[in-house]
Image (spheres, rainbow, N blue to C red):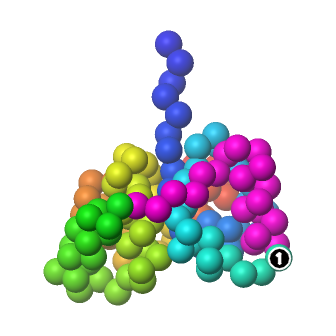
Amino acid sequence: MEKAVEKKVFDTALILNDFYFSFEDPEYYTTNMVVEELKDLRARAVLNQGLRAGKVRIQDPRKETVEKVEKAASLRSLMVSGTDISVVALALEIGAKVITDDLNLKLLAKHFGLRTEGVYFLKKGS
């Protein structure tokens, strides 16, 4: 029996914090807000490589899910950006792991029972 592919939603840190990153796994997702934060040529080139290879999908979460995540962040006094909220909301909708180095983003994802993984650990292969 074939193992199911794990979906991963990434924030900006995945591309910015790992200079040699390439999309190896088949199912990565991100939001338009993350894409807007990728301003330098190298970051854009890495994203475009993933898009051309069909390994990255850009998808925005529904407004209702964003509002749910915003409320949870506010109640827990977590300092997160709108981009962070969009990442958690999308992961919640599609049942994906969140890839980030941002502690508050990880705490917010864990509040919803989402698994997280740091960019550092991806580099080390764990």
Q: Amino acid at mark 1?
A: Leu
Q: Is residue 47 left or right of residue 78?
A: right
Rendered residue at 35%/52% (across/down)? 93
Whole-percent x, y for residue 40 in the image: 77, 80
Within the magenta stretch, is there residue 44? yes
Q: Which residue is mark 1?
A: 41
Q: Position of residue 69 (x, y in %)?
A: 27, 69
Snapshot quadrant of residue 49:
bottom right
Horizontally, residue 100 falls left or right of residue 36, namely left
Residue at the front extreme?
63
The x, y position of residue 5, in whole percent, is: 53, 34
Q: Nearer the viewer, residue 119 or 45?
A: 45
Up-down relation of residue 19 to residue 37 (above or below): above
Picture residue at 64% right of the left edge, 40% below the top: 26
- Nearest the viewer among 35 and 125 is 35
Label 1, secondary structure: give it: helix
Total marks drawn? Answer: 1
Name the outermost residue toward the top: 1
User: Residue 60 versus residue 70: which sits nearer the camera?
Assistant: 60
- In depth, the one of 57 and 19 nearer the eye is 57
Q: Position of residue 61 (x, y in %)?
A: 40, 61
State left or right for residue 102 relative to residue 124: left
* Whether residue 36 can be seen here: yes
Which residue is found at the position 72% from the left and 53% from the top?
Answer: 51
Numbered range of the magenta stretch: 42-61
Quick one: which residue is furthest to the left in this view? 75
Disc 1: CA contacts within 10 A as few (<14), some (14-19) or many (>=20):
few
The part of the image, by quadrant, that contains residue 84 is bottom left
Is 64 magenta? The answer is no
Query: Which residue is rendered at x = 60% and y = 52% of the image?
Result: 57
Q: Is residue 103 visible?
A: no
Q: Is residue 120 above or below residue 115?
A: below
